Image: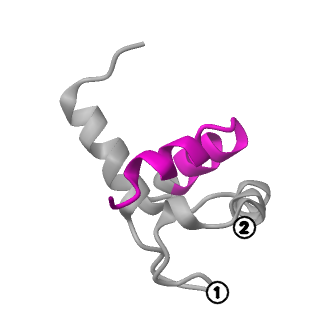
Amino acid sequence: MTFSQQQQAEFLKALQVKMPFGKYQGRRLMDLPGHYLAWFNRQGFPDNQLGRQLALVFELDHNGILPGLREQLKPK
């Protein structure tokens, strides 16, 4: 599967978005704990852009892809 440059940019943006509320307010979505993402998955993600971004990060975490992405995006 290939992604357009726009899709790639949106993907990377979603990982960098900061959680706007709650216990983990201010943390990047890609740094949220797996149990918190799983809780959102069970409760239902918000019906907005943040919800779509959280769902993406949950899928990446659930499928074991997120740790490698964190490593690649870590400041050097």
Q: Which residue is mark 1?
A: 23
- The image's colouring method is one colour
The residue depicted at 48 percent of the width and 75 percent of the height is 19
Closer-to-camera residue (65/2): 65
Magenta stretch, residue numbers:
54-76
Task: From the top left corner, tell me how far across and down residue 27 is, in percent.
Answer: 49, 76
* Location of residue 1 with respect to 55 vertically, above or below: above
Residue sitting at x 76%, y 62%: 43
Tell me, yes or no, whether the highlighted magenta stretch contains residue 69: yes
- CB under 8 Å between discs 1 and 2: yes
Q: Residues within 10 Å of mark 1 (few under 14, many from 20)?
A: few
Mark 2 element type: helix
Q: Amino acid at mark 1?
A: Lys
Q: Nearer the viewer, residue 17 or 55?
A: 17
Task: Assign the C terminus to one quadrant of the image.
Answer: bottom left
Q: Residue furthest left?
A: 5
Q: Amino acid at mark 2?
A: Tyr
Report the predominant secondary structure element of the magenta stretch.
helix
The count of marks equals 2
Q: Is residue 59 magenta?
A: yes
User: Which of pointers 1 and 2 lies earlier in the amino acid sequence?
Assistant: 1
Pinpoint residue 23: horizontal percent, then vertical percent.
64, 87
Residue 57 image offset from top left, x and y in percent: 55, 50
Q: Residues within 10 Å of mark 2 (few under 14, many from 20)?
A: few
Give the numbered dot on residue 36: 2
